[in-house]
Image (cartoon, rainbow, N blue to C red):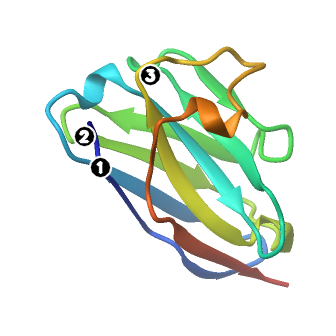
Amino acid sequence: QVQLVESGGGLVQAGGSLRLSCAASGRTFSSYAMGWFRQAPGKERDFVSAISWNGRTTYYADSVKGRFTISRDNAKNAVYLQMNSLKPEDTAVYLCAADLTFPSALEAGTKNLWDYWGQGTQVTVSS
């Protein structure tokens, strides 16, 4: 089992950058695929990005491709989301997710395939 705690959210102006972190408990973090989702008020939880256990394969939602970068440090039990060129429409609660199975690109956005979730960190982008 793994517990996830996100941090790094905040208020930023459009065009700015933030780096989110997700700290994971447990000795087997390196076995887990990791993902980031986001949820804006009144909207569905949307897929943002995912990374395989070894960091070699990554997926991105079209809306963030070229602006966001996912990475992980298995020695630190952490996954990161570097967010650049932020837009007001990026405003949401960002949640970290984990699963022992790395989904395909088509499946990565399926929320119920991810077994573990953090509580989220708020990102607000002002115009």
What is the distance, in whole Å, between disc 2 and disc 3 at their CAs?
13 Å
Task: Name the element at disc 3.
Answer: loop
The three-letter amino acid code for the residue at tag 1 is Gln
Position of residue 12 relative to residue 39, above or below, is below
The three-letter amino acid code for the residue at tag 2 is Asn
Residue 26 at what x, y percent from top left?
17, 39
**Residues at marks 1 and 3 touching, judged by CB atoms closer than 8 Å:** no
Task: Name the element at disc 2.
Answer: loop
**Residue nearest the observer in this picture, 32 or 127:** 32
Task: Name the element at disc 1.
Answer: loop
The reply, left or right, for residue 12 in relation to residue 87 is left
Residue 55 disc label: 3
Residue 113 at what x, y percent from top left?
60, 29
Q: Nearer the viewer, mark 2 or mark 3?
A: 2
Which residue is drawn at the image coordinates 14% and 32% (left, top)? 27
Q: How many marks?
A: 3
Q: Disc 2 marks which residue?
A: 77
Crowding near the residue tagged with mark 3, few <14, some 14–19, many ≥20 C-alpha atoms within 10 Å: some
- For this orientation, the residue located farthest to the left is 27
Crowding near the residue tagged with mark 2, few <14, some 14–19, many ≥20 C-alpha atoms within 10 Å: some
Q: Disc 1 marks which residue?
A: 3
Which residue is drawn at the image coordinates 72% and 22% (left, top)? 107
Closer to the N terminus: mark 2 or mark 1?
Answer: 1
